[in-house]
């Protein structure tokens, strides 16, 4: 049984085309069905494929603004490690980072290494999870596109996200197009088996 919370603040970061909006909608629907007030802000930045994207989700007893303020995120979920680092302005000692182990080189710039990014995140908080979600999904399911659902599933199964796994599965059925449901349900099971 998940203990009710006063409020929970999530920032989801990544690049366009990685499924951030689907992640946001699944989490928002699950939080609503748990009885929480939910506010979200769908997009900040360049939403076209490959551009930086950021989404905010806040849920709890009473939520006034959809935006997570600097230093107040409970969770930062990221689909790309440099984007995770960019979102670190929303983090404080209470924050958990949950990132896909993916580094997309920025043309004309020297990218930090995975270890450098993890080291910088750990200067903020000890709660850093970097998971090769895309690789796992690619290997087991033949597509890395469900990495975001893998991270959400891992988050609820490990109680990093204070929502029940059943509500996440229910939300997936309500939010995702029927043709994509089966692969995402398999992704959830994959995360369950690896948790």
Image (spheres, rainbow, N blue to C red):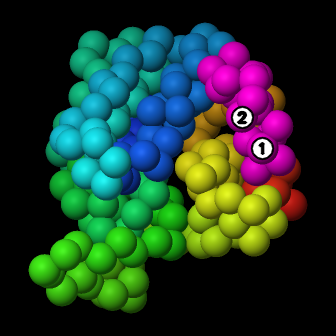
Look at mark 1 in the image and give the residue it sits on: 183
Query: Which of the 4 image quarters holds residue 133?
Result: bottom right
Alpha carbons under labels 2 and 1: distance apart: 6 Å
**Residue 33 pos. (x, y %):** 65, 14
Q: Is residue 98 visible?
A: yes
Q: Which residue is mark 2?
A: 180
Screen quadrant of the N terminus: top right
Q: Element at badge 2?
A: helix
Badge 1 crowding class, 10 Å Cα cut-off, few under 14, some 14 to 19, many 20 or more, is some
Most distant residue in the left direction: 108
Q: Eyeballing the image, is 63 above or below 3?
A: above
Name above or below for residue 62 compared with residue 93: above
Q: Residue at x 34, y 36 (%)?
A: 55
- Label tally: 2
Characterize the local packing of mark 2: few (<14), some (14-19) or many (20 or more) Cα atoms within 10 angstroms.
Answer: few
The majority secondary structure of the magenta stretch comes to helix
Query: Percent x, y for residue 114?
Result: 39, 83
- The C terminus sits in image quarter: bottom right
- The answer to whether 76 is drawn above or below residue 163 in the figure is below
Q: Which residues are magenta?
A: 169-188
Q: Is residue 133 left or right of residue 118?
A: right
Q: Position of residue 28 (x, y in %)?
A: 52, 23
The quadrant holding residue 107 is: bottom left
Q: Are marks 2 and 1 in contact (CB under 8 Å)?
A: yes
Disc number for residue 22: none
Q: Position of residue 89 (x, y in %)?
A: 19, 55
Residue at 78% x, 44% y: name it: 183
């Amino acid at each position: 049984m998940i203990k009710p919370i006063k409020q929970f603040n999530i920032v989801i970061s990544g690049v366009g085309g990685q499924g951030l909006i689907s992640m946001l909608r699944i989490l928002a629907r699950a939080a609503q069905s748990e009885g929480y007030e939910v506010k979200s802000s769908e997009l900040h930045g360049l939403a076209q494929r490959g551009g930086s994207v950021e989404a905010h989700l806040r849920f709890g007893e009473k939520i006034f603004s959809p935006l997570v303020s600097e230093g107040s995120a409970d969770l930062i979920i990221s689909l790309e490690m440099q984007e995770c680092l960019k979102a670190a302005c929303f983090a404080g000692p209470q924050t958990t980072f949950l990132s896909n182990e993916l580094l997309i080189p920025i043309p004309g710039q020297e990218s930090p290494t995975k270890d450098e990014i993890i080291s910088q995140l750990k200067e903020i908080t000890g709660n850093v999870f970097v998971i090769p979600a895309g690789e796992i999904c690619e290997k087991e399911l033949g597509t890395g596109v469900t990495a975001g659902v893998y991270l959400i599933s891992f988050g609820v199964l490990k109680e990093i996200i204070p929502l029940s796994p059943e509500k996440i599965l229910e939300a997936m059925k309500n939010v995702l197009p029927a043709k994509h449901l089966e692969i995402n349900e398999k992704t959830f099971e994959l995360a369950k088996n690896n948790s």
